[in-house]
Each structure stands twice: as C-alpha cells, then as structure tokens.
Image (cartoon, rainbow, N blue to C red):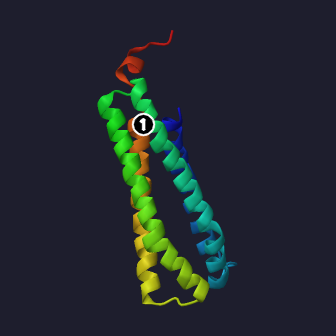
Amino acid sequence: MLFRLCPAAWAGAAALFVLITVGLTRSPEVDSELRMQLSLIRFPYYYVLEFGLLGTALVAGFFARRHGELGSIRSWLGLGLVALALAGAIADYFLVYRPLEKMMTDRTLDGAFRSLHEASKHGNSTIVVVVVIAALVINWPSRAHRRTKIV
C-alpha cells in the first residue's frame, strides 16, 4: 500500500507546492524580499516531505516485491524510478538547494544564483515527472484486475 500511495502523494504535494509558489511569485503584493523569506521557510518542508515520501516508497517497494501482485517487471521498474527520483532529490538538495539557501541567507544574489535557480526548476520538474511515471507504473491495474467485471 505505501509503495503505491507515497509516489502518488508526492506528485500531488509537489503540484500543490508549485501552484502556490507560482501564485505567490505572480502576486503584486509579494515583493522579492518576501519571496526570498517565504522560500527559506517553505523549501525545508518541501524536502522533508519529498525525502519522507520517496524514502518510504523505496523501503516499501522492497517489501512489496515479495508480495508479487505487481509482477516482476513493474515492481522493478517502479522501484528503479522511485530510487532514481530519490537520488535526484538528494543531489538537488545538496548541490543546488543548499548553495541557493546560503546565497539567500547572505543576500548574495548574483549570476550563480540565477543559474542554480534554473537548475533547481529543471531538476525538480524532472524529478516530479519521474515520480508521476513511477506512480502510474505502480498503480496501473494488473491484467487480472482489468479482466474482473463488476456486476
């Protein structure tokens, strides 16, 4: 259950986070200083939730392989995609977010900040796409379930 639930939950949480972020950045009431403060407050929670859900999915996926309901190919593919997304999230956190966080805290927003910010947007978008694909692979009904007719 957790192997199926956690990737789908993360995809939804990330979509909600993006919608809120886009709304705030386009709002005329939010200036750049407030945007930076909100980023410093929100992003640690973003990563905690991401690591928690994807880490749980990875561990649960190893146990789910023993259950056998997904089939060997789908369970390995789902597990591989979740592991890839988690590895990407860890790399993004340490190689991109932490330097961005330091620049925002020190108020040293230069060309490197813009480059890292773009890398963060593209990296996180890729991670979310991988997680959505993993959720589809993991949650797609098996042949046995598709043949079952509800009367």
Q: Give the residue at the far left of this rendering.
A: 73
Task: Give the camera-side residue of 93 and 127.
Answer: 93
**Outermost residue, top direction?**
151
Give the image quarter of residue 87: bottom left
Q: Position of residue 106 (x, y in %)?
A: 59, 88
Camera-nearest residue between 113 and 52: 52
Side of 108 relative to 149 (left or right): right
Q: Give the side of residue 7 with respect to residue 78, left or right.
A: right
Q: Residues within 10 Å of mark 1 (few under 14, many from 20)?
A: some
The x, y position of residue 109, in whole percent, is 52, 88
Element under disc 1: helix
- Residue drawn at the location 66% of the way across and 78% of the way down: 37
> Which residue is found at the position 38% from the left and 28% from the top?
70
Residue at the location (53% across, 84% down)? 103
Amino acid type, mark 1: Phe
What residue is shown with label 1? Answer: 62
Pick the front one: 48 or 126: 48
Q: Position of residue 50 (x, y in %)?
A: 53, 55
Q: Residue furthest right?
A: 29
